[in-house]
Amino acid sequence: MVAMSFISAPQCPHRGTGGVGKDRHGFVELAADQGADEQARLAGRAAHPSEVAHPHESLGQDMDEPAAQELVGMKGDDMGAVGAALMTQQADAPIGGVSVLRTQSPGGGGIADFPAGRSTDPRYEFASRLNFRDLMRTLLPFLASAALAAAAGKPIVAVYDLEGTLSENGRAEASMLSMNLDAERPLTFHDLSVAFREAAADEAVQAIVLDADGAMLTLPQIQELRRHLIDAREAGKDVWIYSDYFNNKTALLGSAANRFVLMPEAAVNFSGIHAESMYFKGMLDKAGLEAEVVHIGDFKSFGEEFYRTGPSEFAAKQTEELIDGIFSEIVDDVASGRRIDRAKVLEMIDRGTFNVDDAKQAGLIDDRQHRTDFNAMLREKYAEAKFDREYALPDLDGPDVDNIFDVFKLLMSSADDADSKSDYVAVVAMQGGISDASVAPVRKAIVKLLKDEHAKALVLRVDSPGGSALSSEVLWEVTDEWKSTGRPLAVSMGGVAASGGYYISAGAARIFAEPGTITGSIGVVGMKLVVAEAMEKMGITTHSVKRGEHADAMSMTKGFSEEEEALVRKSMEEVYGTFKKRIVDGRGERLKGELEPLAGGRVYTGRRALELGLVDELGGLTDAIAWAADKAGIGEPKSRLLPEPKSPLEGLFSKPEKDKDGELVGMSPARPSVSEALAAMIQETTLAALPESTRHSVGRAVQRLRAIEENRVQLIGPDLELRW
């Protein structure tokens, strides 16, 4: 197991993308402009001139943000709550006998009153039949037209303040233990990559401002976002990166900007990457536990951490090659982006430490400024522009939950996705380990898409180290079913698509990988944990009765006999043969040479995999979407991530989807039990005293042992979660 310093951890857990409320587009102000007379009729009074904002004043305030608000603020701002508080208030005094919902946007202008409830006054007969949501749905087309008309010709500065993990599948886990009941659905990598692509292409966007200090990004995610920023620069836009830190992540993103600004006393940690493996044999020996592992493939190193005290020669060689490849990607991108010699970048890395002035003198950054000065400079430089904090991003606001009745509404709501009335590219993500539970929702989404005539192509986003051989085959089969319809299938590889992750990718017509993607690991491993000695130490004895010569072969109270190990190996070789067949059938002549020399558990970077014919193109998710849209004949590469992302609150309370036209016998993901939740809590408490990196590595080892317990034959790659 190798834990590498790679994924950047957030500096503060709180979300800082503030300045918005439920109605962040300021449409109430627009209603005051476009429909003031109609609103006055509905409210039973004439609109007072002082309460109807001038259209340009209203839009200028609402669709931007209050002038006092920072464009790039410190993490932990909760301006969303402030915006929501400013957006809606309940009037105490009724008008004409009708309770009125009074709404005002943060800009301060354009108050609009809406009747709430019934009245005998005929002036409210129409309004009383409408609830607020119906009224907004009716007025929305007019409001959108007004927004476009008022904003026409005004340049845009797209501001992105990123925090936390960018989920690939958008499925946030609700936890009663952690009380994670956020009503806001998570921002996904699909959301952000599409937004960056649109910002780079939109002539109205004059500049992009990015602060990613608190974001946990993998190298492939950074590489795709960086490419979009470079596209924006080539289109003549300004790209600004601001950070309190100079590390691998910010150095890569900053290398794509024409203005990379650091805080004067920024923390500098740009010293390369580090890999450290943890081996648990000594701990297992003390506990009286023994891991029996069978490998198919010399480089299939998973399991070594449980029966060795250090890496095998094959595993050590493989890790060295991966480290070299990833380190080269970082150095080359920083050097080319900053237009400095590669040797200079290596010199700065090998210094071990340096300050902001040293970074500026070396050409790694452009300037040093405090946040206050940076924000003031942006407002002055782009005084005529509209600062849009959510340019091209979806509405992340979850359901309104103000009382117990709103909770009941969530309980009664259906999980059906909204019908799409136009052609699109479907994006379905397989994220994390491959098991029955993780594959079930992915398979279900694809089965549902098979019946959707508007889903013209499918992109499978794979960010998985693999897992169960059986579950991998289940997911491969449904993608093969999709291919039989004649619709395009592409795969976009994320941080890792190894072993089972490559198995489910192999059948695609086009495979995209980032240069820093970890892929390959074509091999099989089987394992069981023998607990006989531990039980003896605790005074536990067993008595066994069997019918069938090898019925107890997988018993954890005894090791494999020679005959049993031979039987297990034969079964695994059959799985290995199927694995290679899936690859040969899917890749065909695109493979560079015979498959066996490329297999055997060998792991590659995306760049090396392209040279070997294991992938087709270096590119990201948006590249895969564009290819699929072109093959499907869709003019604009419109895409949808499915299943629709949900907030933790929606995921906890919404009813399971029921598809009356679905499969008679389908897969059902297991729901986490209370006992499993308590076990996880106990594990976290037990490991709390360990350093975070060690705690994380031990936690992953436990997860993999549980995966082995569920399915003895695994298509799983080496533990190469990279962090920096």
Image: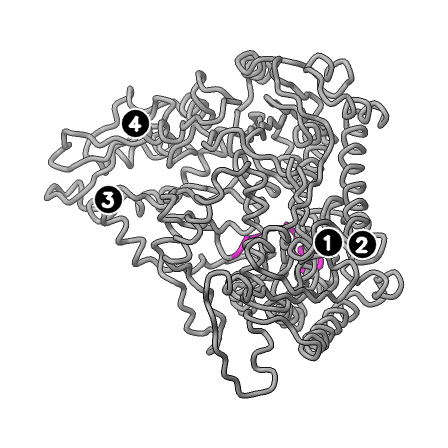
Q: Which residue is mark 2?
A: 314
Q: Which residue is mark 3?
A: 403
Above or below 634: residue 28:
above
- First in sequence: mark 1 or mark 2? 2
Q: Are marks 1 and 3 in contact (CB under 8 Å)?
A: no
**Helix, strand or loop status at disc 3:** loop
Foreground disc of the pair 3, 2? 2
- Say the numbered circle drawn on residue 519: 1
Disc 1 marks a residue whose amino acid type is Thr
Measured as percent of width and height from the top left, residue 105 is found at 35, 28
Foreground disc of the pair 4, 1? 1
Q: Which residue is mark 4?
A: 111
Q: Is residue 452 visible?
A: no
Above or below 561: residue 676:
above
Foreground disc of the pair 4, 3? 3
Disc 4 packing (10 Å; few <14; some 14–19; many ≥20): many
- First in sequence: mark 3 or mark 2? 2
Mark 4 → mark 3, Cα distance in angstroms:
26 Å
Magenta stretch: includes residue 641: yes
Disc 1 packing (10 Å; few <14; some 14–19; many ≥20): many
Q: Residue at x 44, y 34 (%)?
A: 146
Which residues fall within the magenta stretch? 627-642
